Amino acid sequence: MRSLSITYRNLYVLFVLLFLSFVASLICGTILFGPADIVSGLIVHDSSIEHAIIYQIRLPRALSAALVGASLGIAGCLLQVTTRNPLADPAILGVSALSGLALAVTTLIFQDAGPMLRAIACVVGGFIGAVALLLISRGVDSPLRITVVGVAIGAFASAGIVGAITGSRVVLELALGFLAGGLYGAGWFDASLWVVWIPAVSIFIIFFTRRLDNLALGDEVARNLGERPEMTRVCAILFSGLITGAAVSIGGLISFVGLASPHIAAGLIRRAGPSFYIGSMIIGMFIVLCADTLARVVISPSELPAGILTAAIGAPILIYLVRREL
């Protein structure tokens, strides 16, 4: 009971931090707004600068950043649990890069592609990346070996992205928006993906949390508990590929969020049950929101790619985990 009370208390704290980071993303930027300006910009639909900036630009961007963070947070959880690899992350294992490669090829072929086609391309690429990960991890027991192969696939896909966009008219857009990772052009279409994302993730958590908890105990234990570990692993990794693709379609190749979020959540919340996945999603949202807000104010009026800041957070965590595994 004491452990559960600590878990719920920490979840409440995470929700408060998430709310504050969301409000900060609406306040901060080239122009700073006060609380009254935020309320006015959200409620009063007129031609004022508050409404134009807050409602049309910052609100959909904040919602999009939260969606990217939540997607990467739970994708990292699923990959770490199913591969039993504490180093697993969509970016490290090459899933994000293959999603980005699918986008680069699609944009090269259809240079006037709309946001819907680009989103579909990224989701398909993420699914292909998940399939590749399943094939690679089959029969491999060493988490570090899986990580090394995933890094190689990511490097190959990244090289493919650069090759696909070199000499095309979309070099700057893809290079800044996807190779570095950022939410420069995020708008209401990206934010509207919450409508599909929330029910899909909710249904998955409801039906698969117990199976994933059993899978974390080992395949043999899961079988003794009446589970089918292979099927659970396939479903979880494929689902992680789909939501990673959704994240890449909005924020590009933002790295290390899927690596850091589950480990931070495990330190605050027990590594079991829906609370673990919810906590990872909240932490992922918090990280990306803070990174995107800082990216807009550090060198204002210019802007840094948010992926640089998430890498600054995640790289030390990766080094620590590798040293611990070795």
Image (cartoon, grey):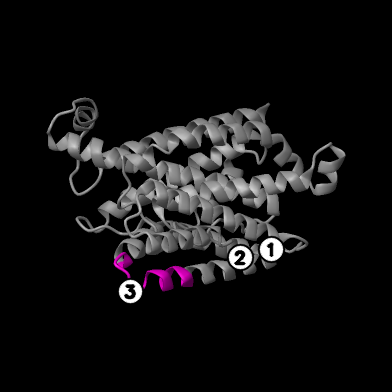
Task: Kindly identify which residue carries mark 3.
Answer: 167
Report which residue position mark 1 lands on. Answer: 136
**Circle nearer the N terminus (2, 1):** 1
Which is more foreground, mark 3 or mark 1?
A: 3
Amino acid type shown at disc 2: Gly
Q: Is residue 172 left or right of residue 142?
A: left
Residue 290's place in the image compared with 34, above or below, is below
Secondary structure beneath disc 2?
Answer: helix
**Disc 2 + disc 1, Cβ < 8 Å:** yes
Determine whether label 3 and label 2 are within 8 Å by CB. no
Magenta range is 159-171
**Residue 150 has which mark?**
2
In the rendering, at what x and y percent does residue 316 appear? Answer: 51, 62
- The image quadrant where one finds the N terminus is top right
Task: State the SS at label 1.
Answer: helix
The amino acid on which the numbered mark 1 sits, given as a three-letter code, is Ile
Residue 133 visible within the image: yes
Label 2, residues with CA under 10 Å away: few <14, some 14-19, many ≥20: many
Checking the image for residue 220, the label placed there is none
User: Counting residues from the N terminus, which is met first, the one under dot 3 or under dot 2?
Assistant: 2
User: Residue at (38%, 69%) from the top-left corner?
Assistant: 165
Toward the viewer: 255 or 132? 132
